[in-house]
Amino acid sequence: MFILVLAAVAVVGAAEPDACPGGVVALNWAAMPTEEQIWWSYPPAAMATRASGMVTLRCGVTPAGATENCRVIEETPAGLGFGAAALTLSTQFVFRPKVACGQAVEGDVSIPIRFQPPPDLVPPDGPGPSPRALALGRRLLTAMHGEAALDAWVTAMTDASLRQVGFNDAVRRKAMFEAMSGSFSAHRPEMLQAMVVAYAGKFSEPELARAAAFFESPLGQKLSADDTRLQAVVAGATESVRVQVQWEAKADFCAKVQTCGDAPPPTPQAPSPGP
């Protein structure tokens, strides 16, 4: 789930006449900011109030497809830092450049950007699994060492976030680790329940009972100890909670270090040339 949503890019200027073989090919997307870069760009002042915002940038595009000379031409609401946040993301937009007469040339674009906080977590519509199915799902999760799998996944997610952000000083790394760990711990029961619901909604009650009995057996225990497929269940069932955890962790981190805006977004890999 993305915190920032991009609208379609508007090419600035009128279309040029087809005055040469090959004509003119308009520029188009090649790469956008990653989820981690988007997460770190969200203005702390807006995060504190869960405010959304809209920014339009106007940028030049070089023959290599990079943006240059970006400026804010619209920001709503003003004063919460959305314009500055959009500018920090501007270098992460990469385009397939405009081509005229077979040669890449400079171009201009307007980039509308909508900042949107993650929605509050709400239960899904519908009656959901029966109480017996939930009990069997919980039994199956326990037999498959679901809590250990969740804890391993949380550790991997925390480590990955620290590597992505790339803080070099110990104070920031410690603050980020404490923020992530604290938020994950607060949502741990919620994530475990999401995994139970995922199993209870996917299998029938007889299937859940047979699966739980198997994984409670010595052979089932041996298989589940080395079964990495449960990681996929963890990741899928807890995705919405993970977004909430990241949101809360960044807010906590910003409050602790008071320099959240100084944290640069991770640098993406150079995109491969388009066709």
Image: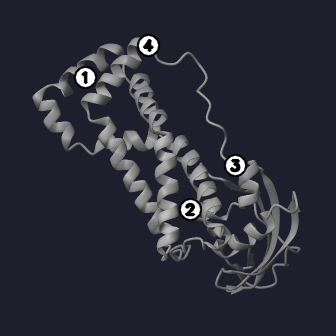
Circle 1 SS class? helix
Q: Quadrant of the image for the C terminus?
A: bottom right
What is the secondary structure assignment of the residue under circle 4?
Answer: helix
Residue in the foreground of this view, choosing between 248 and 238: 248
**Where, by quadrant of the figure, is residue 208 drawn?**
top left
The residue that mark 4 highlights is 131
Q: How is the image coloured?
A: one colour
Q: Amino acid at mark 4?
A: Pro
Foreground: 183 or 53? 183
What amino acid type should be assigned to the residue bearing mark 1? Ala
Residue under numbered circle 1? 212
Q: Identify the residue shown where x is 43% and y is 61%.
A: 160
**Residue located 20% across and 28% down the image:** 215
Q: CA distance from mark 1 to mark 3?
A: 38 Å
Label disc, if present, on residue 36 of the rendered structure: 2
Q: Residue at x 50, y 43 (%)?
A: 239
Q: Give how far apart the Cα atoms at labels 4 and 2 are.
A: 37 Å
Q: Which residue is depicted at the point 36% across and 42% down?
A: 150
Task: Identify the secondary structure beneath mark 3.
Answer: loop
Task: Indicate whether 200 appears above or below 178.
Answer: above
Q: N-terminal of the two: label 2 or label 1?
A: 2
Crowd around label 1: few <14 · some 14–19 · many ≥20 (10 Å) = many
Q: Amino acid at mark 3?
A: Pro
Is 199 displayed left or right of 167 in the figure? left
What is the distance, in whole Å, between disc 3 and disc 4 at their CAs? 33 Å
